[in-house]
Image (cartoon, helix red, strand yellow):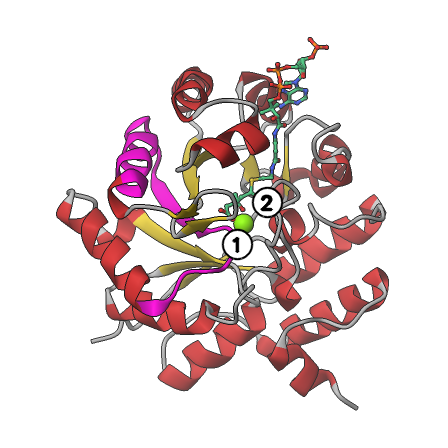
Amino acid sequence: ELPTKVTIYEVGPRDGLQNEKSMVPVDVKEQFVRRLLATGLPVVEATSFVHPKWVPQLADAEELMTRLGEDGKGLPVLVPNERGLDRALELGLRHVAIFGSATETFAQRNLNRSVDEQFAMFEPTVKRARDAGLDVRAYVSMCFGDPWEGRVPVEQVVSVGQRLFDLGASQLSLGDTIGVGTAGQVTALIEAFLAAGMAKDDLAMHFHDTYGQALANTYSALQSGITTFDASAGGLGGCPYAKSATGNLATEDLVWMLTGLGIEHGVDLDALVATSAWMAGELGRPSPSAVVRALSQS
Ligand code: HMG
Ligand code: MG
C-alpha cells in the first residue's frame, strides 16, 4: 500500500545550480527560490555554505540569503563544517544539512577527508547546530554506486548513514549521486536501514536521473513506505565532484506521477512548469524534464 501524502524536498537552487558553469546572477536565484516557494513546495534547499573555491556558483550564498530575508530563514542550506555553520548562524538560518560519503574516494574528492575524518568534521558541527536550536538533515552520498569504486555494499551505506544520522540529524537522505541505482536495490537498501532500526519517516530518497531510473526508483521507495523525496525543478543538477552525475529527478516528473497515483503533494504543477521553463531560458538550454517539455510546448 502506497502512502497517501508525501513531502517533496526541492533541491533545485542548490543541487540544481551548483554545477552550472556560468554564474547565475543572484537576482535570478532569488526569483527562482521565491517562485518555487509560491508553487506550494514545502521545502526549498536554497544554497550551500561551502568553500567558494570548491563551488564558485554558490559563492553568493550570503547575498542570496540576505535578499531572501525572513522568507529564507526557514530554508535549509548545506554546511560541511563549523566554518559553514558559523556563516549560516550569522544570518539567523534555522535548518542546515551535512553531507557525508559512503565511499572513501568520494569523501576525498568532495570533502578532502577520509570517511572517518568526515565525522571529525561533522560531529562538532552538528553538536553546535543542535545546541543553537537548529534542525539538521544528513545526506549520505554514493548509496548505490560510485564512479571510482563501483557498486557500494549495502552494509557500508547503512553503517555510514546510521552514524551520520546518530550525530543528531532529524532526517537521513539517501543519495544516488550518479543515478545508477535500480528499483530492486532501492528496496534492499531501505529494508536494510529499517532492519537496522531506522524509521521510515527518518529516511528520504535523493535520486539523480542519469540512467533514467529515478521515477522507477521513487515508485519502489513509495512501496517501501518512504514519504520524503528530493527533487530538482526542471531536472537541473549534478555534483561537480562526481563525474557522470547529471540532474536530479525532476520535480515535475515526480509531481506528475504522484498526482496520477492520487498521492497528496501540495504543488501547483502549472506554476512549477512555468518556473522551470523560465529558468531554462535563463540558463540557455531546454529542461531535461519530460514533463516540463510536454507541458511547456506552445
Ligand atoms: P578543505 O580545503 O579541506 O578546508 O576543504 P579546510 O578545513 O582545510 O580549510 C581551508 C580554508 O578554507 C580555510 O581558510 C577555511 O577557513 C576555509 P584559510 O584559513 O586557509 O584562509 N573554509 C571555508 N570557507 C568558507 N566556507 C566554508 C569553509 N570551510 C573551510 N564552509 C571543505 C574542506 C569541506 C570546506 C571543502 O571540501 C568543500 O567546501 N567541499 C564542498 C563540496 C561540495 O559542496 N560538493 C557538492 C555538495 S554534495 C552533493 O552534491 C551530494 C548531494 O546532493 C547528495 C547526493 O547527490 O548524493 C548532497
Ligand atoms: Mg545530489
Give the camera-side residue of 162 and 72. Answer: 162
Under mark 2, the amino acid is: Ala
Helix, strand or loop status at disc 1: loop
* Residue 201 in the image: above or below residue 285: above
Q: Position of residue 244 (x, y in %)?
A: 61, 54
* Region in magenta: 156-183
Pointer 1 and pointer 2: residues touching (CB < 8 Å)?
yes
Q: Quadrant of residue 104?
A: top left
Q: Which residue is rendered at x = 61% and y = 80% of the image?
A: 291
Task: Check disc 1 and report the residue beneath it.
Answer: 178
Q: Decide if residue 12 is on the left or right side of residue 227.
A: right
Task: Check disc 2 and report the residue beneath it.
Answer: 242
Q: Position of residue 206 (x, y in %)?
A: 45, 55
**Number of residues whose C-alpha sits closer than 10 Å to that of mark 1, classed few (under 14), some (14–19) or many (20 or more):** many
Q: Decide if residue 64 is on the left or right side of residue 237.
A: right
* Residue 286 in the image: above or below residue 38: below
Give the camera-side residue of 242 and 251. Answer: 242
Q: Which residue is rendered at x = 76% and y = 50% of the image?
A: 20
Ligand 1 within 8 Å of the CB at mark 2: yes
Q: Quadrant of residue 273?
A: bottom right
Helix, strand or loop status at disc 2: loop
Under mark 1, the amino acid is: Ile
Give the camera-side residue of 50 and 156. Answer: 156
Q: Is residue 79 visible?
A: no
Q: Is residue 188 magenta?
A: no
Q: Which residue is rendered at x = 54% and y = 65% of the image?
A: 209
**Number of residues whose C-alpha sits closer than 10 Å to that of mark 2, classed few (under 14), some (14–19) or many (20 or more):** some
* Residue 73 in the image: above or below residue 132: below
Q: Position of residue 188 (x, y in %)?
A: 24, 58
